[in-house]
Amino acid sequence: MREGGSATDLAFSEDFDRLLEAGQSNRAYWSDLWRYRELFIILAWRDVVVRYKQTVVGATWALIQPFLTMIVMTLVFGKVAGLPSEGNAPYAIMVFAALLPWQFFANSLSSSSQSLVGNANLVSKVYFPRLIIPASAVVVACVDFFISFLILIGLMIWFQYAPSLRILTLPIFALIAFFAALGPGLILTALNVRFRDFRYVVPFIVQFGLYLSPVGYSSQVVQERFGDVAFIIYSLNPMVGVIDGFRWAIIGGESQIYMPGFITSLVLLALSVVIGILYFRKTEKTFADVI
């Protein structure tokens, strides 16, 4: 500030300096996330609009994809392979109860991993907490999630299947699904800034993970055929716990959660979030230079 400047000039200078230096400490960084909340809302709304702009059927794509996937998996695993459902739930409802968190995870991972590269001009020109960009990209997946939930309601009406009071716990498992997508998403979006070929890795992870996770079949089948120890190893995939939680809440009745496996998934999920945030923060300072 120039000598003899006013108090207003001083306040502006201090605020400007903070903008340049923000994020150097964790306390400043997390407070900046709140200060830039309007930017988060703007980016999230823009991503939602861009996703459905100039499409023929608009948001209906969020219904078509999981619905067709549910039909295929019901036919392949339920009819051809003859795998059992959980409890007395129709196989289609069991599959779709797993597709809800899986589609959310897959869409979140795909959107967030490309988010920084897609906003290269914004990242390289102005300061703001870069964590806002991948976090806002997840909002698109949230919109798809709520739209797809309409299919679940339709299936329950069609099969005359009434959920139990467990469904009131569904927001808890939805929050767990959010963090399950956030951790790997932060790691992949940071890696994608430096190594652009990681954009080819994400579709492979999504495709491979769809069959590695208990989406088209019950996780109880894995436990019964391979034993508890093998199932705990299988639960190192965090989506196993998320999917089991969704099924427990939606199907109710005889659907159960194997707690050792569920806790294993939660521990790995929490670890992935911590590693994701730490790695993202560590590499964030170089984004503007290499993007």
Image: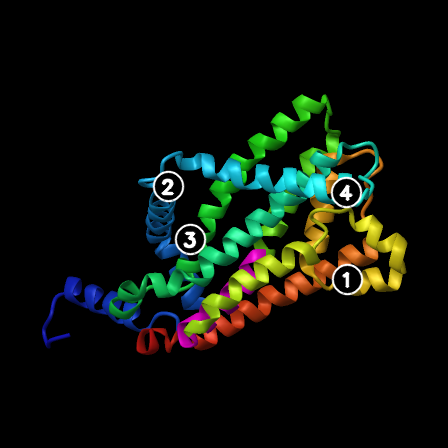
Amino acid carrying mark 4 in the image? Val
Examine the rendering and report whether any part of residue 25 can be seen: no
Please give left or right for residue 180 compared with residue 241 in the image: left
Specify the segment rendered in magenta: 181-195
Q: Residue at x 38, y 45 (%)?
A: 51
- Quadrant holding the N terminus: bottom left
Amino acid carrying mark 3 in the image? Ser
For marks 4 and 3, the one nearer the N-term is 4
x, y (%) of residue 235?
A: 76, 60
In three-dimensional space, the C-alpha distance between marks 2 and 3, rounded to whole angstroms, equals 16 Å
For marks 2 and 1, the one nearer the N-term is 2
Q: Which residue is mark 4?
A: 80
In three-dimensional space, the C-alpha distance between marks 4 and 3, rounded to whole angstroms, equals 40 Å
For marks 2 and 4, the one nearer the N-term is 2
Whether 188 is among the magenta residues is yes
Residue 36 lies, with reference to residue 286, above or below; the image says above
Q: Which residue is mark 1?
A: 234
Amino acid carrying mark 2 in the image? Tyr
> Badge 1: how crowded within 10 Å, few (<14), some, or many (20+)?
many
Residue 136 is marked as 3
In three-dimensional space, the C-alpha distance between marks 2 and 1, rounded to whole angstroms, equals 36 Å
Q: Which residue is mark 2?
A: 52
Task: Give the camera-side residue of 288 and 240.
Answer: 240
